[in-house]
Image (cartoon, helix red, strand yellow):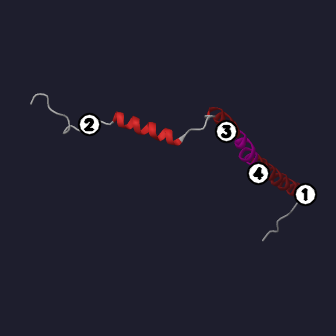
Amino acid sequence: MDKIKFTSKKTFFWLYIIIIILSISALSYNTFFLYKNFYQVITYFEEIIVLKEKVAVETVDIEKFNVITEKINKKTNRRELDKISNPFD
C-alpha cells in the first residue's frame, strides 16, 4: 500500500478550499441572521405604523353599538310567509 504523500502544495490547496468553504458558509449564515432579525423586524414595524394611522381614535360605546345592530337586524329580518295575509281571499 502506498503512503499518501503530503506536500506543501497539496496542503495549501486543501487549506485554501476549506477556508473558502468556511467563508462562504459564514457569509450565508450572517446574511440569513441579518434578514431574520433586522430586515423582517423593520418591515413589521412599518406595517404597524401604517396600521396605527388607520385605527379609530374614538372609543366605541359597546352598549349603543349592540342596540343599533339589533335595530338594524330587526329592520332587515323578513316576515314569514305564513304570517302574511293573502289579499285575494
Mark 4 and mark 3 residues within 8 Å of each other at the beta carbon: no
Q: Earlier in the sequence, mark 4 or mark 2?
A: 4
Mark 4 Cα shell of 10 Å, populated few (<14), some (14-19), many (≥20): few
Task: Please name the amino acid that badge 4 sits on.
Answer: Ser
Q: Secondary structure at mark 3?
A: helix
Comparing labels 4 and 2, the label whose residue is closer to the camera = 2
Question: As drawn, which residue projects farthest toward the right?
Answer: 8
Identify the residue at image location x=72%, y=40%: 42
Q: Which residue is mark 1?
A: 8
Task: Work out whether 10 lies above or below 68.
Answer: below
Question: As drawn, which residue projects farthest toward the bottom?
Answer: 1
Task: Please name the amino acid that badge 3 sits on.
Answer: Ile
Q: Which residue is mark 2?
A: 79
Distance from the alpha carbon under mark 1 to that under mark 4: 26 Å
Q: Which residue is mark 4?
A: 25
Depth check: 1 or 29 in front? 29
Q: Which residue is mark 3?
A: 48
Distance from the alpha carbon under mark 4 to that under mark 3: 34 Å
